[in-house]
Amino acid sequence: MMPKSAALRLSGASKSNKHGWQAILAALFVLLVLAASAYTFLYLKHDPTLTDLRGRLQGSSALHPFGTDHLGRDVLTRLLLGGGQTIGYSLLALGAALVIGIPLGLIAGYRRGWVDRLFMRIADGFLAFPDTIVAIVLSGLLGAGIGNLVLAIVLVKWVSYARLVRSTVLSESQKDYIRIARTNGLSDARIMTKHLLPHIAGHVLVLASLDIGKIILLISSLSYIGLGAQPPTPEWGAMLNDSRPYFQSRPELMVYPGLAIVSVVLIANMLGDYLRDRFDVKKEVQP
């Protein structure tokens, strides 16, 4: 029977090899995107919104490596700019959710009492329905548009971060170092920022890295059904929708943005797995 120490070393080596391959794949993906961006924007210099009906639905060529769409626009240029739209707005929504959720979770977990009870009732109301359903309803009520879609995602996502921070603060605030800080006369704000915030940073970072893939999928899917980015803005979900009528004749027009979404989500999930092991976060942190 294998000794426990040897088994632990073998497990650690397996995790190290796994993370090594993940880092290599992520680095290769980033280098590929940077090379494609440099070639497209420094050499080809296509206008992503300029239509050319004489050159519509062209195949791959030196001038158009990924061909052209149904309006004669360069697919590679729109794909790269669409990535900036999709990922950029996803990071914006995630950042706004963190800015709202972390302070509320800190205050609710540290203050407790009626503040915590009020927060929990609000959180229960947001969590009564699945994230996707709430985001669709809010986007429909607010109106189509990428700004309204980001706002809907923020209203949905802040609760999970606030609840995570609250549960961590409830656990940490019972420990001796917090009692000593109170005895030494530190203010509540000082205790929360100096002592509690560093302890929740790892948990929040792991959840955020696992959550960014879900947000990208949410923005892409809602843009696909017309609730997100509006034409002629290049965005991966909108590009999928635009290419749908031409799936039989030019299936690659849907394959390119689909592969881009899958690749970025996989990279984000690999980053989340690495950070979860790096910060030794328990399995209760779920995306």
Image (tube, rainbow, N blue to C red):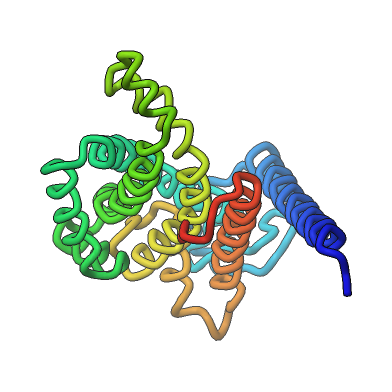
Between residue 266 and residue 112, name the one nearer to us: 112
Picture quarter containing residue 153? bottom left
Picture quarter containing residue 179? top left
How far from the left and from the top, in percent, is residue 127? 24, 63
Between residue 76 and residue 283, name the one nearer to us: 283
- In the displayed structure, 174 sits above or below 213; it is above
State the residue lying farthest toward the bottom: 248
Residue at left 32%, top 16%? 186
Residue at left 39%, top 62%? 218
How far from the left and from the top, in percent, is residue 34? 69, 43
Residue at left 64%, top 57%? 270
How far from the left and from the top, in percent, is residue 96? 33, 40
Residue at left 26%, top 48%? 151
Between residue 211 and residue 192, name the one nearer to us: 192
Q: Is residue 17 left or right of residue 139?
A: right
Q: Is residue 180 left or right of residue 131?
A: right
How far from the left and from the top, in percent, is residue 171? 38, 44
Q: Is residue 76 left or right of residue 65?
A: left
Q: Quadrant of the N terminus?
A: bottom right
Answer yes or no: is residue 113 visible.
yes
Picture quarter containing residue 135? bottom left
